[in-house]
Amino acid sequence: MEKKIAIFASGTGSNAKKIIEYFLGNDQIRVDLVISNKGTAPVLAIAQSFGIDTMVIDRSSFYQSDIIVDQLKGRDIELLVLAGFLWLVPDYLVRAFPNQIVNIHPALLPKFGGKGMYGMNVHKAVKESGETETGITIHYVNEKYDDGKSIFQATCPVYDADTPEQIAKRVLQLEHENFPKVIEKVLLEAGNN
Ligand code: GAR
């Protein structure tokens, strides 16, 4: 049976777009739903342009009810993919999808993770710390920010002259190259267990 993904994203959606494109025409895996906590997030228009259903969630229903579990299970979603989703995943959702939620983080965890460490904040911290290397971490999600078991890391250099924006660009490129392939591997391996 076809395996279905739901992408959670708060913003631009460049990773979501790469993931959607990667699985177009794949008869084993498809992006079934894109969920955002922001009604104006560009990721929603991207999903709609591919004919993918979208859902906007609000803070109170996400944290005070578990209705989303039924909505996701009702669609037979097997993997939740966080692609620039900035809210903490509530415990009930982690329990309902054990080892079925993955996140991408724009640095080499466990460094530069945790609350408030997202987007440019991460790249500025990397620059300020004088690191000569940064990269991406794709990991399972648990009930803490950026804390679940690592699945994959890839690195890229940080040059002395780099601005945080230049670091961000290099890291985003790594995300685009690797995230769809790692998602595919996680889903195909889950099918063999
Ligand atoms: C990505 O760089 C992702 O790693 C980061 O947000 C960006 C989303 O970009 N996520 C975090 O910082 C999570 N802590 P996109 O909307 O263009 O895919």
Image (cartoon, helix red, strand yellow):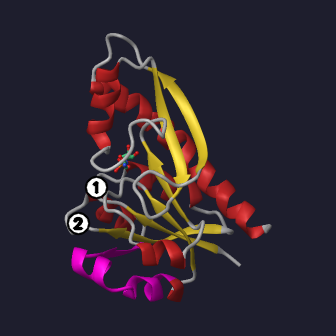
| Vertical order, 57 against 49 (above or below) | below
Q: Residues within 10 Å of mark 2 (few under 14, many from 20)?
A: some
Foreground of the two, 59 or 22 = 59
Q: Residue 119: x and y, percent?
A: 30, 42
Residue labelled with disc 1: 11
Which amino acid type is shown beneath numbered disc 2?
A: Lys
Q: Are marks 1 and 2 in contact (CB under 8 Å)?
A: yes
Asked whether residue 69 is drawn in magenta, I would say yes
Q: Is residue 21 visible from the viewing direction of this image?
A: no
Q: Which residue appears farthest toward the right when viewing the image?
A: 192
Instruction: Give the mark nearest the N terminus, 1 or 2.
Output: 1
- Residue at position x 31%, y 57% from top? 86
- Residue labelled 1 has its Cβ within 8 Å of some atom of ligand 1: yes
Q: Which residue position is annotated with label 2?
A: 38
Q: Is residue 56 magenta?
A: yes
Residue 181: x and y in percent read 62, 49
Q: Which percent across, then down, holds residue 53?
A: 40, 76
- Describe the element under mark 2 as helix, strand or loop: loop
Residue that extends furthest to the left in the rendered view of this protein: 40
Q: Amino acid at mark 1?
A: Gly
| Residue 138 located left or right of residue 36 | right
- Residue 86 versus residue 107 in the image, above or below: below
Mark 1 neighbour class, 10 Å CA radius: few under 14, some 14 to 19, many 20 or more:
many
User: From which residue to which does the magenta span run?
Assistant: 52-72
